[in-house]
Amino acid sequence: VFRMTENINMKHAGSGKRATIHLRCDSDIEVFREIFLLEEYLSDADGEVKTIFDIGSNIGLSVVYFYLNYSNARIYGFEPDPRAFRWLEETVNGLEDIKIFNVAISDKDGEEKFYAHPKYTASSSLKQRSSNQEPISVESKTLDTAMRDIGIGEIDLMKFDVEGAEEKIFNNFTNLPKVKKLIGEAHLDLMNLTKEEFLKKFDGFDVGVKDINDKRFLIRSEERRVGKECRSRWSPYH
């Protein structure tokens, strides 16, 4: 049982890497459960992972998960919410091979309207979710621009949890074939797409899905290789 405002010190049994996380609200506790107990971002890539893009890093729980589990990886985290980003900075302070950006990944370079949730940063979004939300302006980049600016030619593992912005991200991402594995959450209730239309964007990948409810699902995909069996533990999507 974890209490809010409690620091949790973590150590990976294999690598010996250590990190400390801070849970500030019940939403953080639920995200912790999903990431560290249910291991929703577990990948079988292991030592193959050298470069990780974490899109929608929030307060950094997913970044810490990747940091502890992929000892040879360099992690790039993207989080547009100013409040969440301050906590993200605290979370990764002192951890090596992590670089974070206060940027929204979208379908354009420039600025985007962003709707910060008043209580739960994990529910902040580029989508307006209630009529009383006032937008703020945040910097935005496409994934192609982010890769170019950082100097990355390939991404071994990409995680996304962006509360409906996934439609914008993948509409305008020409370097998708240079991503080896993707893990993320799709929010059909916040997109103008059906499940079939969204998954069509990942032609060329072996895709597994895990339904959360009738409007949201987790997706895990890896590049399709001739003669290679898909190793996803989730239900294959055809």
Image: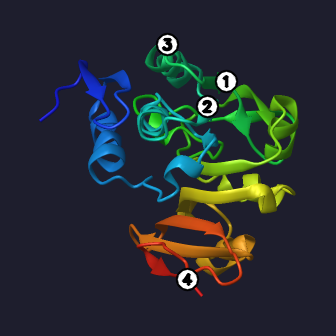
Q: Give the farthest residue toward the bottom.
A: 238
Q: Is residue 20 left or right of residue 148?
A: left
Question: Going 54% across and 60% down the picture, which residue do you hit?
Answer: 187
Q: Distance between the residues labelled 4 and 3?
A: 39 Å
Considering only order in the chain, which callout, 1 or 4, is on the residue closer to the N terminus? 1
Residue 142 coordinates in the image, percent (x, y): 82, 43
Q: How far apart are marks 2 and 4 (CA)?
A: 29 Å
Residue 145 coordinates in the image, percent (x, y): 86, 39
Q: Give the farthest residue toward the left.
A: 1
Mark 4 highlights which residue? Answer: 237
Residue 119 coordinates in the image, percent (x, y): 40, 29
Q: Is residue 227 above or below residue 193?
A: below
Neighbour class for label 3 at 10 Å: few (<14), some, many (≥20)? few
Between marks 2 and 4 in the image, the one whose residue lies nearer the viewer = 4
Q: What element carries label 3?
A: loop
Q: Is residue 60 left or right of residue 162?
A: left
Q: Distance between the residues labelled 1 and 2?
A: 5 Å
Mark 2 highlights which residue? Answer: 79
- Residue 144 placement: quadrant: top right
| Residue 7 visible in the snapshot | yes
Q: What element carries label 4?
A: loop
Mark 1 highlights which residue? Answer: 102
Residue 86 coordinates in the image, percent (x, y): 53, 15
Amino acid, disc 2:
Glu
Mark 3 highlights which residue? Answer: 93
Q: Is residue 203 above or below residue 122?
A: below
